[in-house]
Image (cartoon, helix red, strand yellow):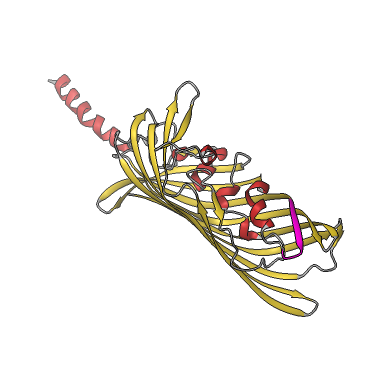
Amino acid sequence: MKKTLLLAALLLFVPAVSAVHAPITKLRFAPAAGTKLTRTFENKTEFSLDDLSLKMNGQESPMKPEVEMTTNQSLKVVVNDEFVKVREGAPAVLRRKFDELGTVMKVDAKIEMMGTSTPQNKSGTGKSELTGKTVVFTWDEEAKDFKTAFDPAEEKSELLKGLHEDMDLRALLPKDEVKVGDEWDVEVGQLSGVIAPGGELKIKPEEKPDAESPMGMGDMGGMGGISDWLGDSMTGKAKAKFTGMREVGGHSYAVISLDVKAKGSKDLTELVKGAMEKQAREGMTMETKSVDVEFEIAGQGELLWDIEAGHAHSFEFSGPSSARMDIGMNIEVQGTKMEIEQGMTLSGTMTLKLTIE
């Protein structure tokens, strides 16, 4: 009888002990084959000019103007994805149609030189040849990478270079099961796929600028966006944390918070060379030698993960950012050759949002 009572007491005690410990959650990528998702990604940046330097033939230019400048840029990407086949933790075959790819850019500037103040404004848009096209990503087990191809087939292979299939931000997921309150490190080198998912989307400025460059030479108008700047050179720290579950629209999602402080650099010469040289005035020839950018990003984000469906539901990120741009060019005007070095330091904010339906 005593043994029976003791066993009964133990059976009652075990659930009570288990209840003290937080439940374990597995946050993994596991959508069913055939799942179709529409993803909308929006990135907005606003920068103000903090400092401007200008050298001509290696000497500080006496003609350097006093400049106030603010730039605003918005990027929008809409894709339709179909997970044709799925492997453990990632797609095996992904079919992606690029429905919308574009940027809108606005530069407001006031330039003071020799006692004269002149407002100058510029606006423009960026487009991508990928718009309307469908790309199939197929996992190559031997190469341990995705092969990309157009469907239907096209010969513009240069458009496929640098594309990434992951727009679920899988880099933010923990490697192991977690409980509420657990933290883990995110590889900083993979942040480019988080802050600018989809990879190099080949968005380029329209052929004709809406107005003359406020700087009289290269400016932010052809610099691309943060998605163009990010690369493997990023260093710093990124921490993720499982903060619990949240009800949204009658469905429960896992909440992963993200804290980032990172920096990096990139050579943008080839990206912006053509757009900058188109800004040369009549009677002027311009050769772009170098365009280098160094940038810093700090901010907080939040990923909602659909545990039941096995994919991301939404992501938001915001915080301060800064950039240093150094531009080198050769200019010839009426037979006079000049070597120009221009530097700009800018700071501002970046916000991004990813929604998935």
Above or below, comparing residue 227 to residue 6 in the picture: below
Q: Which residue is drawn at 61% across and 42% down?
A: 234
Left of 74 or right of it: where is 30? left
Horizontal relation, residue 17 to residue 106: left or right: left
Whether residue 71 is visible, yes or no, is yes
Residue 283 is a magenta residue: yes
Q: In which quarter of the image is residue 331?
A: bottom right
The stretch in magenta equals: 281-288
348 or 52, nearer to the observer: 52
In x, y percent, where is residue 323? 65, 55
Across and down, in percent, residue 169 comes to 44, 42
Seen at 82% across and 59% down, the residue is 55
- Tell me if residue 43 can be seen: no
Q: Where is residue 133 in the image (x, y as percent from the top left)?
A: 42, 45
Relative placement, left or right, of 174 versus 268 is left
Q: Which residue is drawn at 77% across and 70% down?
A: 65
Q: Quadrant of residue 32?
A: top left
Q: Is residue 173 magenta?
A: no
Q: Position of residue 154 (x, y in %)?
A: 46, 38
